[in-house]
Amino acid sequence: MMARAPDALGPPEITDLALLVAGGVDGDGVHWTLTEPSQLNMNLVRLEPGHMLPAHTNHDVDVVIVVLAGAGTLVVGDRTSAIHSLVVAHVPRGVRRHVAAGPDGLVWVTVHVRRGPLTLGAARPRSSGERR
């Protein structure tokens, strides 16, 4: 039996992503997310062959990307890298990134600190060409 820390919020989550990675779902987007409560957020993201995730900047948290299947291109700031299964990338907060899938598509997991709830407030000024 696994011991649980006295301040743990819930049981550990163990998820077999094999079906999702093997193509059990179609379409671009997030196909799995770690359930709350957790200090971490994890998402399994899939891009169909030749599709891309438009360039964007995350100003809140660093993100770790772990490629599980397929191949493609990751642009972080001014650095372009070929990515494929079992490549791990760190994307610092505040740095623009862009992901493009190759001919076999691309499946990856993102891991980052869970952000708090979105709140209404004054918008942060955007730099030229930046999307939200």
Image: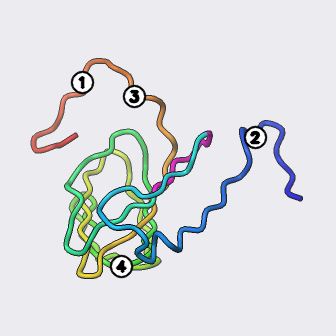
> How many neighbours does mark 3 have within 10 angstroms: few (below 14), some (14-19), or many (20 or more)?
few
Q: Position of residue 58 (x, y in %)?
A: 32, 44
Residue on which the image places disc 2: 8
Range of magenta residues: 37-43
Tag in front: 1 or 3: 3
Q: CA distance from mark 4 to mark 1?
A: 37 Å
Q: Is residue 120 above or below residue 30?
A: above
CB-based contact (under 8 Å), mark 2 and mark 4:
no
Q: Is residue 120 magenta?
A: no
Residue 70: numbered disc: 4
Q: Position of residue 55 (x, y in %)?
A: 20, 54
> How many neighbours does mark 4 have within 10 angstroms: few (below 14), some (14-19), or many (20 or more)?
many
Q: Is residue 4 above or below residue 105?
A: above
Q: Amino acid at mark 3?
A: Leu
Q: Earlier in the sequence, mark 3 or mark 4?
A: 4
CB-based contact (under 8 Å), mark 1 and mark 2:
no
Q: CA distance from mark 2 to mark 4?
A: 35 Å
Q: Earlier in the sequence, mark 1 or mark 2?
A: 2
Q: Nearer the viewer, residue 124 or 71?
A: 71
Q: Amino acid at mark 4?
A: Gly
Q: Earlier in the sequence, mark 4 or mark 1?
A: 4
Name the quadrant containing residue 123.
top left
Q: Is residue 40 left or right of residue 31?
A: right
